[in-house]
């Protein structure tokens, strides 16, 4: 072994106890190499072998302890009962006083043993049991009067509880030791001879074992030997001057007070450097992970922003399309209303023309009536002329008779002249009669024509009146459509300003259709709603109508 090598002061492959609690990942077996450590299996708990002698001793201890306890409690019971009577307890309560005192001792000790078995000891129970035991001893010792008067008699009464407590303490120690054996945490005791031979160093030795959880006395000896050997090696290396040693070389002496072995102290710088490197690597990894997460978050935010802008543009395009469609529809309705108004104006002009024609027909009817009156006058004139012709005929006949009577006196030439005159008068009268008949028939034909013209004029007037009423109805309908188109246009503008959704627009349009229907409860039908809103589902149309009714109940008006 060279002087630069760390001395080996422990035998190779020597098992040691667990390292101090404050040190993690420490070795549990020293290797043969200088400063090297290797890991071995954990220390297995020692299981005591049972033999007949141990069984017999256990049985004797149990029987003897029970017998001592029974005798002690029996003697204590009678003594404490008498003491209770002498202290003023009643005959009914005096027997219960020793039961309460002795039962409390048994209960506290039993609870203490149970909690130790469950690895949850509570020192107060043991202290309370010992206090009650002391009280029992005092009560029994003082039951015969003053203790100083007869101490032997007092001791005879107080010894039995002491024996019982000693037996319980032995059982407690046995249970604790068994639990430590099962858990592998049995702590070796420092031999008495060490306390005697090294009274100043042993307390420090004991303190290090207890502070750092070193349960093996041989291991503590080896640690002490390692430290002394390392210190001597370091002095040889630096010619007896430890001030020349580096901080890392002095670590075993500094860290020994904190429970570190020589190997652990020498390995500490390298381990700390590795841990520092690991922490630096972990910090770098976390930094890179943070940068990666930030970059991912930034890209994700950018993607979300682009997606949101795309959705916004899509919604804006859809809203603009719906708004443009609504405006186009409103403009179409306005154009249709204007066209209807123009047609109604034309119809109105047609009605005016029809009214003028009716007035012309009325004038024709009046003219026909005048013609009929004139024809009737002509008929009456013809009738008068016929009567006059009849009269002239009669006068001619009278003249002919007179001429016949005067034939004798007149000459033949005069008679013939008169006859020719009479014949001419008769022919003229017949001709006049035929002319009067012709005029009567013409007047009758004119009357019939006037009546036919009157009927035609009346029919034309009725037709023109119907056309006028139809034109007025169309004008009113056109005005209503124009007003509805204006209301629709204003409603669309209000909806555009409110930025309503397509569904809200559809519901409000159905509400306006219901208002336009007025008292007609059957309008609008689901088919009208489907056709107007271009939806294929009757269920959707029904929902729109129900929502529109609810909206109207809430006070919706298109002009608001």
Image (cartoon, rainbow, N blue to C red):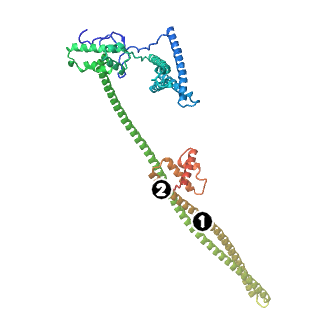
- Marks 1 and 2, the one that precedes in the sequence: 1
Identified at 53% across, 25% down, the residue is 80
Residues under numbered marks 1 and 2 in contact, where contact means CB atoms less than 8 Å apart: no
Instruction: Kindly state the secondary structure of the residue where label 1 is placed.
Output: helix
Crowding at label 1, few (<14), some or many (≥20) Cα neighbours within 10 Å? Answer: some
- Compared with residue 130, is residue 319 higher up or lower down, i.e. above or below? below
Instruction: Kindly state the secondary structure of the residue where label 2 is placed.
Output: helix
Residue of label 2 = 490
- Compared with residue 517, is residue 153 higher up or lower down, i.e. above or below? above
- Compared with residue 27, is residue 104 higher up or lower down, i.e. above or below? below
Q: Which of 200 and 25 is in front in this view?
A: 200
Identified at 45% across, 47% down, the residue is 319
* Real-space Cα separation, disc 1 to disc 2, in angstroms: 37 Å
Q: Nearer the viewer, residue 66 or 472?
A: 66
* Front disc: 1 or 2: 2
Q: Can residue 38 be seen in this view?
A: no
Residue of label 1 = 465
Instruction: Indicate the position of residue 266 as horizontal and vertical percent values.
Output: 29, 18
Instruction: Indicate the position of residue 513 as horizontal and vertical percent values.
Output: 55, 53
Quadrant including the N terminus: top left
């Amino acid at each position: 072994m060279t002087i630069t090598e760390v001395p080996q002061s422990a035998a190779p492959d020597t098992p040691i106890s667990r390292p101090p609690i404050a040190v993690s990942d420490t070795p549990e077996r020293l290797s043969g190499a200088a400063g090297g450590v290797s890991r071995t299996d954990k220390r297995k708990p020692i299981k005591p072998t049972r033999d007949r002698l141990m069984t017999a001793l256990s049985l004797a201890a149990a029987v003897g302890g029970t017998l001592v306890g029974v005798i002690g409690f029996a003697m204590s019971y009678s003594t404490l009962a008498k003491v209770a009577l002498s202290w003023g307890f009643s005959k009914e309560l005096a027997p219960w006083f020793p039961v309460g005192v002795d039962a409390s001792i048994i209960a506290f000790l039993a609870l203490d043993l149970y909690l130790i078995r469950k690895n949850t000891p509570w020192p107060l129970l043991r202290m309370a049991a010992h206090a009650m035991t002391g009280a029992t001893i005092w009560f029994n010792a003082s039951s015969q009067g003053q203790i100083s008067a007869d101490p032997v008699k007092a001791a005879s009464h107080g010894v039995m509880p002491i024996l019982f407590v000693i037996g319980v303490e032995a059982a407690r120690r046995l249970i604790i030791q068994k639990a430590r054996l099962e858990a592998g945490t049995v702590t070796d005791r420092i031999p008495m001879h060490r306390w005697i031979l090294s009274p100043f160093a042993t307390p420090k030795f004991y303190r290090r074992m207890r502070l750092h959880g070193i349960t093996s006395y041989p291991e503590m000896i080896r640690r002490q030997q390692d430290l002394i050997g390392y210190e001597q090696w370091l002095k040889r290396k630096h010619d007896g001057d430890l001030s020349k040693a580096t901080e890392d070389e002095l670590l075993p002496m500094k860290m020994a007070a904190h429970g570190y072995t020589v190997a652990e102290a020498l390995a500490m710088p390298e381990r700390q450097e590795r841990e520092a490197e690991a922490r630096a690597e972990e910090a770098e990894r976390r930094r890179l992970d943070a940068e990666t997460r930030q970059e991912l978050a930034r890209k994700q935010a950018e993607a979300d922003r682009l997606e949101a802008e795309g959705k916004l543009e899509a919604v804006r395009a859809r809203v603009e399309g719906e708004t443009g469609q609504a405006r186009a529809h409103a403009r179409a309705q306005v154009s249709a209303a204007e066209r209807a108004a123009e047609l109604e104006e034309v119809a109105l002009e047609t009605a005016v023309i029809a009214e003028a024609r009716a007035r012309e027909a009325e004038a024709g009817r009046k003219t026909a009536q005048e013609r009929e009156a004139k024809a009737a006058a002509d008929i009456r004139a013809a009738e008068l002329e016929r009567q006059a012709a009849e009269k002239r005929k009669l006068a001619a006949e009278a003249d002919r008779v007179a001429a016949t009577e005067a034939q004798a006196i007149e000459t033949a030439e005069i008679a013939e002249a008169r006859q020719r005159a009479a014949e001419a008068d008769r022919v003229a009268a017949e001709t006049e009669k035929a002319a009067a008949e012709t005029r009567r028939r013409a007047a009758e034909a004119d009357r019939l024509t006037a009546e036919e013209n009157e009927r035609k004029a009346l029919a034309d007037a009725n037709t023109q009146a119907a056309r006028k009423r139809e034109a007025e109805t169309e004008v009113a309908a056109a005005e209503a459509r124009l007003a509805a188109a204006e209301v629709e246009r204003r409603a669309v503008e209000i909806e555009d300003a409110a930025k309503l959704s397509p569904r809200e627009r559809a519901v409000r349009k159905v509400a306006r259709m219901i208002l336009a229907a007025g008292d007609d409860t059957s309008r609008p039908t689901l088919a009208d709603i489907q056709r107007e809103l271009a939806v294929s589902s009757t269920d959707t149309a029904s929902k729109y109508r129900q929502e529109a009714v609810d909206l109207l109940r809430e006070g919706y008006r298109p002009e608001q």
